[in-house]
Image: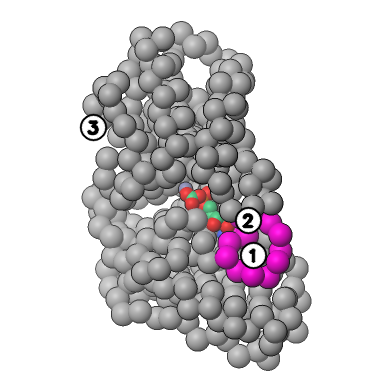
């Protein structure tokens, strides 16, 4: 089965071709540099960039894959959640390709695809049947459990997502880079931690049960910008942001006695989190490869590989669903 997958839910134009579970061609064109000067993604501008780049990227993906357009069996596209205009660019391209090549097209939920991204390249039966999962990204902070493929959400953020808090704090600190997560994580990596040990940690918002909250942490940074150096704030912020995540993971593995933990979404690239969590004994932790942690089309195509037997081909009057929730389609 040769699958062409399209992802345009935000500011990454991504095309991937898969032969069943294997990625045979993969491209991501990030727009971050273009949105950088505005301190965030400008939706209208993002749609225009997708529109100007997507066809060239599809041609590149085909050239790189070693197969021809006529060898494709299915087109798969993200229909949500995401920005309405950028999703529409991907969907209209998927419909047009489907019509021209006379092959069906299918829709995928971006969040569901993130969840399975750590397993890209693996066969269906290599995925653990039971797991606690976290989706931590620019738009979402979700913890849940997966039993077979039934997903139950245990908790979500009540305000900002964790990625959003990284982005906002980077802006407050004037790090002049969007998104802020990678730069904060990188700077944290270079800190000589022993110089910061004396600092009192920022009390975390520890909501009952499994919900998260990140707006308090952002406010703390806002209020303390003159009380600490930038390095000190980076140190305190990153540790506090990740403490909530680690706390809830520990709570869930204890409550449900599940030892497999899936962590996906853009923030799963975080090196501090990866190190910290690998030190918890007795867990099997599944992170995506770094190239598949952010938004990408390989995860969209892979989700189709996993679940195509349960999917129906789409009609040409299908619209995008910018507010789709995990597990919905
Ligand atoms: O999944 P993603 O690419 O897009 C959404 O679907 O939202 O996630 C993007 C988010 C941004 O907020 C970005 O700052 C954050 O992921 N991010 C990170 C790191 N790399 C990306 N946050 C913390 N540490 C990182 N290394
Ligand atoms: Zn995403």
**Residue at image location 75% in from the left, 84% down from the top:** 195
**Residue at image location 62% in from the left, 35% down from the top:** 29
Q: Residue 274 occupies which quadrant of the picture? A: bottom right
Check if mark 2's residue and mark 1's residue have beta carbons within 8 Å.
Answer: yes
Residue 165 at what x, y percent from top left?
A: 53, 66
> Badge 3: few (under 14), some or many (20 or more) residues near its Cα, within 10 Å?
few
Mark 2 and mark 1: Cα distance apart in space = 7 Å
Q: Residue 187 occupies which quadrant of the picture? A: bottom right
> Badge 2: few (under 14), some or many (20 or more) residues near its Cα, within 10 Å?
some
Residue position marked by numbered label 1 in the rendering: 171
Residue position marked by numbered label 3 in the rendering: 310
Residue 162 at what x, y percent from top left?
A: 49, 65
Residue position marked by numbered label 2 in the rendering: 39
Residue 299, can we see it? no
Q: What stretch is highlighted in magenta?
A: 167-181
Q: Which of marks 3 and 1 is nearer the N terminus?
A: 1
């Amino acid at each position: 089965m040769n699958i062409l997958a399209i992802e345009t839910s935000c500011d990454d134009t991504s095309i991937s071709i898969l032969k069943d579970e294997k990625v045979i061609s993969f491209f991501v064109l990030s727009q971050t540099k273009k949105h950088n000067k505005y301190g965030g993604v400008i939706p209208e501008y993002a749609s225009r960039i997708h529109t100007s780049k997507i066809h060239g990227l599809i041609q590149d993906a085909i050239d790189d894959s070693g197969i021809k357009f006529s060898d494709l069996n299915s087109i798969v596209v993200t229909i949500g959640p995401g920005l309405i205009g950028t999703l529409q660019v991907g969907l209209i391209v998927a419909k047009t390709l489907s019509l021209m090549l006379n092959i069906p097209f299918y829709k995928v939920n971006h969040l569901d695809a993130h969840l399975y991204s750590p397993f890209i390249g693996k066969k269906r039966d290599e995925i653990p049947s039971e797991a606690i999962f976290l989706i931590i990204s620019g738009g979402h902070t979700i913890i849940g459990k997966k039993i077979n493929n039934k997903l139950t959400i245990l908790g979500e953020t009540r305000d900002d997502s964790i990625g959003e808090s990284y982005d906002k704090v980077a802006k407050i600190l004037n790090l002049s880079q969007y998104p802020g997560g990678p730069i904060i994580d990188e700077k944290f990596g270079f800190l000589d931690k022993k110089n910061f040990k004396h600092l009192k940690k920022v009390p975390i918002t520890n909501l009952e049960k499994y919900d998260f909250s990140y707006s308090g942490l952002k406010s703390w940074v806002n209020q303390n910008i003159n009380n600490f150096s930038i390095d000190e704030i980076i140190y305190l912020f990153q540790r506090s942001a990740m403490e909530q995540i680690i706390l809830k993971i520990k709570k869930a593995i204890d409550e449900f006695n599940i030892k497999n933990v899936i962590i996906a979404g853009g923030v799963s690239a975080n090196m501090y989190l990866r190190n910290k969590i690998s030190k918890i004994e007795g867990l099997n932790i599944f992170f995506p490869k770094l190239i598949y942690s952010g938004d990408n089309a390989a995860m969209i195509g892979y989700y189709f590989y996993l679940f195509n037997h349960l999917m129906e081909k789409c009609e040409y009057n299908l619209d995008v669903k910018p507010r789709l929730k995990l597990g919905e389609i």
